[in-house]
Image: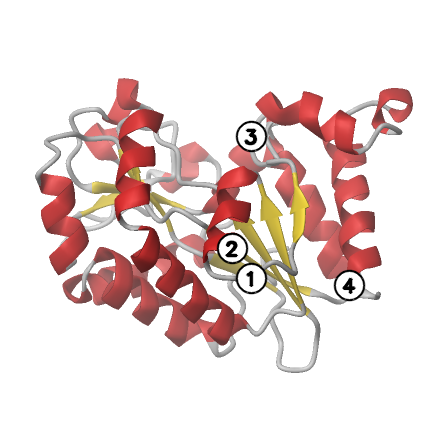
Amino acid sequence: MKDLFCNSCRLTAEVPMLVASKILGQEQLYKILFRYQQMRGNYDLTYTEWQKVFTEDLKPYKGYTDTTSIVMPVTHPMFGKDIAALHKGAIGVDLPTWFNIKEDNKHIMIIAQDPLRSSKWYGECTDAVLSSPFGQQDFEHRQRGNGGKMMHKLIEELTNSGCGVYLTDANKYFIYDHETTDEFSANHADAYAAILREEMDIVNPIIVVCLGRAAERMCNTMGITDVLSLPNMTGTARGAIIKRFPLLEESGATADNIAKAYADEIKYNLNR
């Protein structure tokens, strides 16, 4: 999968430029470009191995050794000002990532809800804590059944079928807790929708998959109703996942079985 992760294509330049100009701030473009390079080059490293490749500009908050997330200032004129006014930390931003995107294959756009961060560990951090949707740059996170394993297996299923996959969040920021984030997202819904629309223009997806109600609501706000809506792909959503795919009660709601059910549903809708 390493060769497919953030593979070289149009998105290699266009997505970092979008993140800089529309989310984090144009001044962060160089760091964002280097962060993509950092994630791509160290895709299969353990946390111990990652300690050797962090830099002074791109490293975890407080030197945490159990994460591949790094911190970066928010200098975007609007978002930076509005976040600073809240005087709260645990500011999450997920860099959109992609797998196997080519000019001549089918592109699947998967929209998650938001870049959740823990106020317990990042409550005093006023920089953005950067990861990716479902932490797919993180080898150890991808092995966890309640972490990124389900998404990792889903991406494997879809790319093995020759498709390209693009991952992003509907709400571009998470701030401190769900209450603060919900209010912030509501106040910036138009900006988020505009960013998401630009992402769609860049990716040109054949199908849009919304994971969770927040992602579905954002698409509805944009007037995009032709989407495939599925439960959020997390351990806490297993009840909703089984309700959506009752056969999992018999086969077992393992990461592999859930990924197969999601992949089959996406491919069925892809080929309609």
| Residue 63 in the image, given as x and y percentages of width and height | 23, 30
Marks counted in the figure total 4
What's the distance in space between the residues labelled 3 and 4, CA to CA?
Answer: 26 Å
Question: First in sequence: mark 3 or mark 2?
Answer: 3
The reply to whether residue 26 is visible in this rendering is yes
Mark in the foreground, 3 or 4:
4
Question: First in sequence: mark 3 or mark 1?
Answer: 3
Q: Residue at x 23, y 56 (%)?
A: 24
The amino acid marked with disc number 3 is Gly
Residue that numbered label 2 is attached to = 219
Q: Are marks 2 and 1 in contact (CB under 8 Å)?
A: yes
Residue that numbered label 3 is attached to = 147
Residue that numbered label 1 is attached to = 224
Q: Are marks 4 and 1 in contact (CB under 8 Å)?
A: no
| Residue 36 in the image, given as x and y percentages of width and height | 38, 60
* Nearer-the-camera pick, 106 or 219: 219
